[in-house]
Image: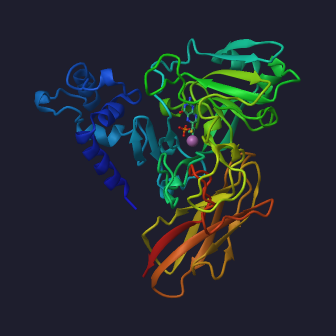
Amino acid sequence: MTTEGENKNNQRTQFLEKPETADMAVEGCTVNNDRRGFLRGAGLATMSAAVGMVIPFHRNIPQGFIPAAMAQENVLMGKDGLTLLNDRPVNAETPPELLDDAITPTNRHFIRNNGLPPEDMSAEGWTLTVDGFVDNPMEMSIAALKDNFEVVTMALTVECGGNGRAFFDPPASGNQWTLGAVACSEWTGVRLKDVLAKAGVQSNVVYTAHFGADSHLSGEEGKLPISRGMPIAKAMTDNILIAFAMNGEDLHPMNGAPLRLVVPGWPGSCSQKWLRRIELRDQVHDGPKMTGKAYRVPAYPVSPGTDVPKEDFVIIERMPVKSLVTFPANGAESGKETEVRGHAWSGDRMVDSLDISIDFGATWQSASLDAPVNSGAWQNWRANVTFPQAGYYEVWARATDSAGEAQPFAINWNPKGYLNNTMHRVGLRVS
Ligand SMILES: Nc1nc2c(c(=O)[nH]1)N[C@H]1C(S)=C(S)[C@@H](COP(=O)(O)O)O[C@H]1N2
Ligand SMILES: [Mo]
């Protein structure tokens, strides 16, 4: 497990080798080829402004290098301690021990981008269009959304469908998320169902289609990086927000500013960022990452490595029961008595119990588990454990949901590496 400091060092080294990472850290968002190297020219002013003084030897700064003072403060635009998996598009996850808060602070919310964020994320002039099979198609400003619908704040869990992919064997291609592509921040917005009701959902509607303002990595005009949707019955549930704020502030640029969907319990890909349009369709949506094998799993269990025919894949709906240990950190030293704590969640369901084991699963002890603060929020749990003697232990956490489903020991393998909900194991050195 890397420490926060090590992480930053890694990222600093990365800046030397990968100018685009540096550009992104300085600029915060778009990493276009034509902007690369801006640090040498127009970027100097930005750089001086950021460090708060002139940089006398600026001519010697290598391409892509950014001042260490900035690397510390501006890595991933105010995100703190995240592990950068990929910089084009930007993908960054949060080490579990940094997800200890009941409500995930914005600087610790993971980032999953399929394309390049839009250049202009200003709320002024931003509109949301709702069209397709509706009685009253509409185009509304963010101000109009606030005026016309009840504004609500909810803690909502967002987890990438591919969280845990790194543990697949044989491996699955895609971002190698370990544990930290999940978060539960407090989102403020209007309910999707209220907006859809006002638009007037026609009786033939079966699916939504979501469109954002980000652009495809190829730079091809009009080509979308991702456009997903969900069954209309799901869209009409209470805890889905069209959000314009997170944790009491404007949305973070990397988390979809100025407007996004937040669909708790389903793959994060349903939660379209930089949201511009919702179309109601009389058939399942067929946008990018809706078809083929994207966000789909075989309709039946398969053994690892199986080549499954395309037509046997089904669209992922709810995410499975899962939990995290957020304290202590993996690899930490511990006394003989310690509190162990974390979070648990299960798609649209409640988690009923959380058990922990310190003896590799031979015996289990139940943790105290809170109710979610609202529907769609993860549940916090804690337990006091006593280790019988000094030595190496692992704390395993296993959540069981309201349908009696529990986290498995072994990965439910699928070709694209989705839905890994195996138990989180944290190694401890007890002295
Ligand atoms: N417009 C747009 N929306 C998007 C994406 C994207 O690439 N573009 N990524 C999706 C995926 S796959 C996930 S897991 C979540 C991640 O949200 P976050 O980046 O705020 O953590 O956003 C979803 N919404
Ligand atoms: Mo995702």
- For the point 64% across and 43% down, which residue is it? 310
**Residue 354, placed above or below residue 359:** above
Tell me residue 12's x, y (percent). Answer: 27, 44
Judge whether residue 137 can be spotted in this image.
yes
* Quarter of the rendering containing residue 125: top right
Outermost residue, right side: 203
- Residue 311, given in percent of the width and then of the height, sits at 69, 43
**Along the line of sight, the residue nearer the viewer: 90 or 191:** 90
Q: Quadrant of the C terminus?
A: bottom left
The front one of 159 and 325 is 159
Name which residue lies at 71% across and 50% down: 347
Q: Find the residue positioned furthest to the bottom.
A: 389
Where residue 262 sits in the image (x, y, percent)?
65, 35
* Camera-side residue of 176 and 265: 176
- Quadrant occupied by the N terminus: bottom left
Residue 313 visible in the picture: no
Residue positioned 29% across, 26% down in the render: 36
Residue 326, quarter of the rendered image = bottom right
Q: In the image, is 350 to the left or to the right of 78?
A: right
